[in-house]
Amino acid sequence: MPFDKVMTQTMTDTPDTPVAPTPKVKTLPNSQTVTEVTHWTDRLFSFRVTRPASFRFRSGEFVMIGLMGDNGKPLLRAYSIASPSWDDELEFYSIKVPDGPLTSKLQHMKVGDEIILRPKPVGTLVHDALLPGKRLWFFATGTGIAPFASLIREPQTYDDYETIILTHTCRHVEDLEYGRKLVESLRDDPLIGEMVGDKLVYYPTTTQEDSPKMGRVTDLLRDGTLFKDLGIDGITRETDRAMVCGSIGLNKDLMEILEGFGLREGANSEPMEYVVEKAFVD
């Protein structure tokens, strides 16, 4: 057989050597890759991103995330981390604002896209900012449920408290879906399912669309409906601790209500009976 034919046959019969894929070049500073995007409604979505090996945070904290702005500079906003501290990825829950500088862009993200993640998490909705107690209240409206999505998946929450009450108030029933599905999944969670047991109480309400329980949580607290529904006497400094995350108006009203029950606002440097998150997204 001619030499050139031998070479042709030999080269043809030899399996191709696998070629390693070329790593994707990151184009953003402090960038992380989007791994999952879920659109809950036309106004709400959640997404997960890769977590740097060196990134540490306490469940309930927030971090600055964002994209590059049209001016070539980072456009960042504070977002509560919705995943617990032990999760391999980072989860965020967001509203869609059509003309919002950042959310108008974030809502169009796809798996494989990149976001900017600043490496320093902070926040007051953490266990360290509260004195020991027996019952823990999470008061949330809208996307304010995000830090509590982290905390209800945190083992320490169930170690520290006998009862955890998560209230979530939204305008429409569909806006409650993210929280409802998360709560329903907890008892089957292999890590904390047994810890959750009957300790977690979920109390969702709506303010515009008809649902099994309607009303603003502030009104339901003031007139005692919430306590009657749950079969408890009320909130006291001796037994109750609370965390609040919502609009500025809600935060102010709940601070007044909680202080009326005798609770005092705490901080990382001075733990007390309740804490409020003051970081917001556009």
Image (cartoon, rainbow, N blue to C red):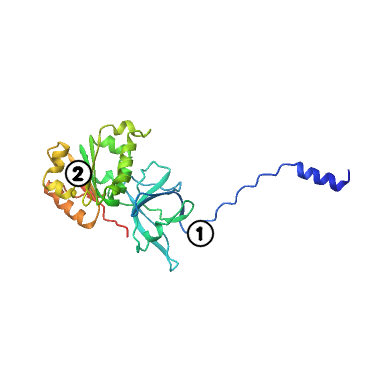
In x, y percent, where is residue 142? 27, 51
Label 1 CA crowd tier, 10 Å (few <14, some 14–19, many 20+): few
Rendered image quadrant of residue 97:
bottom left
Nearer the camera: disc 1 or disc 2:
2
Query: For the residue marked with disc 1, what is the amino acid?
Result: Thr
Query: For the residue marked with disc 2, what is the amino acid?
Result: Lys
Q: How many marks?
A: 2
**Horizontal side, residue 156 vs residue 225: left or right:** right
Asked if one can make out residue 252 in the rendered structure from this viewpoint, the answer is yes
In the image, which disc is placed on residue 161? none
In x, y percent, where is residue 106? 40, 57
Relative depth, front residue between 118 and 1: 1
In x, y percent, where is residue 44? 34, 52
Q: Is residue 166 above or below residue 43?
A: above
Question: SS at mark 2?
Answer: loop
Rendered image quadrant of residue 202:
top left
Q: Tell me which residue sits at (32%, 49%) in the image.
A: 61
Q: Quadrant of the C terminus?
A: bottom left
Question: SS at mark 1?
Answer: loop
Relative depth, front residue between 7 and 148: 7
Q: Tell me which residue sits at (14%, 40%) in the image.
A: 227
User: Mark 1 or mark 2, which has the lower sequence index?
Assistant: 1
Residue sticking out furthest to the bottom: 71
The residue labelled by disc 1 is 27
Rendered image quadrant of residue 107:
bottom left
Whole-angstrom CA distance, mark 1 to mark 2, is 47 Å
Q: Tell me which residue sits at (45%, 67%) in the image.
A: 72
Label 2 CA crowd tier, 10 Å (few <14, some 14–19, many 20+): some
Relative depth, front residue between 218 and 242: 218
The residue labelled by disc 2 is 213
In x, y percent, where is residue 161? 24, 36
Contact (CB < 8 A) between labels 1 and 2?
Answer: no
